[in-house]
Image (cartoon, grey):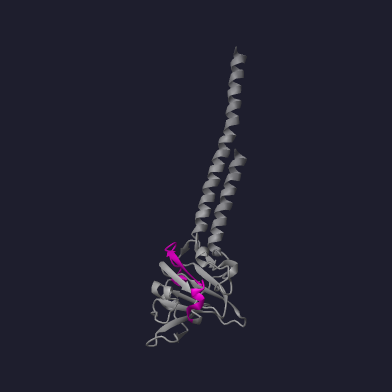
Amino acid sequence: MLSHFAGKEMTGSSRSSRVLPFSNHAVCYLLLFVFVILAIAERSNAYVNYTVGDSLGWYDRLQEPDVNYQKWVAGKNFSLGDFLVFNTDKNHSVVQTYNVTTYKRCDYNDAEADDTTEWSPPAQPTAKVSIAVPLVKEGMNYFFSGNYDGRQCRHGQHFKINVTHGRGLPESLKHPAEALAPSKQETSAGASGGVVVPSVPSSFDNPAQAGTAVAESGAEETVAKMWICLGLSFVAVLVVIG
């Protein structure tokens, strides 16, 4: 009888020992899932450089028939501190405005200097240029090419985005009035009363990896990787001791 009960007890113990490792693995997977979610959340808050039009660049449909910038915008989340990188040539310009009337007209001749900016490319010996524009104001931001009396804009070279607060502006962009001070001001041709629209060199405080399709800041990427490595290490330790 004693042997019979002992056998039953050992069987129960054996079952218990088989269930315990499964429980440890379940906890490990759960913890790994939590760490991955935290890492993804950390990465999603990083500042991003968006290359406008991706490989097609920044051109009107007369030159690049496949461009559709509003379609390119769809599904993207733009926040303060992000950069838009315009890869184009010196025959196309980048005008940023917060004035919907200016945007709809494809014409900044009557724009106010405090709501419209023409971004000029950095000095480059080649015809191809990259213009990096920071997003420093929440709400609707409008972009178009102002060359050739708005013809490029009317042929598809324009788009609008909604900029959210996100993480807020980084320190380097918290004083846009000073950071965006133009090195020169050009009077818009044909503007009544000599309206002046700032022409800002885009080389100021450019993102570290301007020109990449999506470039997260190095610090944010490092933090995300740290979370993942920490999670994997913790899971490995639990598996070993389990």
| Viewer-closest of 95 and 2 | 95
85 relative position to 115: left or right: right
Decide whether residue 201 is among the magenta residues: no
Q: Quadrant of residue 91?
A: bottom right
The region drawn magenta spans 149-173
Residue at 61% of width from left, 41% of height from top?
Answer: 239
- The spot of residue 88 in percent (x, y) is 57, 75
In the displayed structure, 240 sits above or below 198; it is above
Query: Which quadrant: the C terminus?
Result: top right
In the displayed structure, 82 sits above or below 182; it is above
Residue at 54% of width from left, 53% of height from top?
Answer: 227
| Viewer-closest of 138 and 159 | 159
Residue at 39% of width from left, 88% of height from top?
Answer: 194
128 relative position to 157: left or right: right
- The spot of residue 230 in percent (x, y) is 56, 51
Decide whether residue 165 is among the magenta residues: yes
Query: Which quadrant: the N terminus?
Result: top right
- The spot of residue 140 in percent (x, y) is 41, 67
- The spot of residue 49 in percent (x, y) is 53, 67
How many discs appear? 0
| Viewer-closest of 12 and 100 | 100
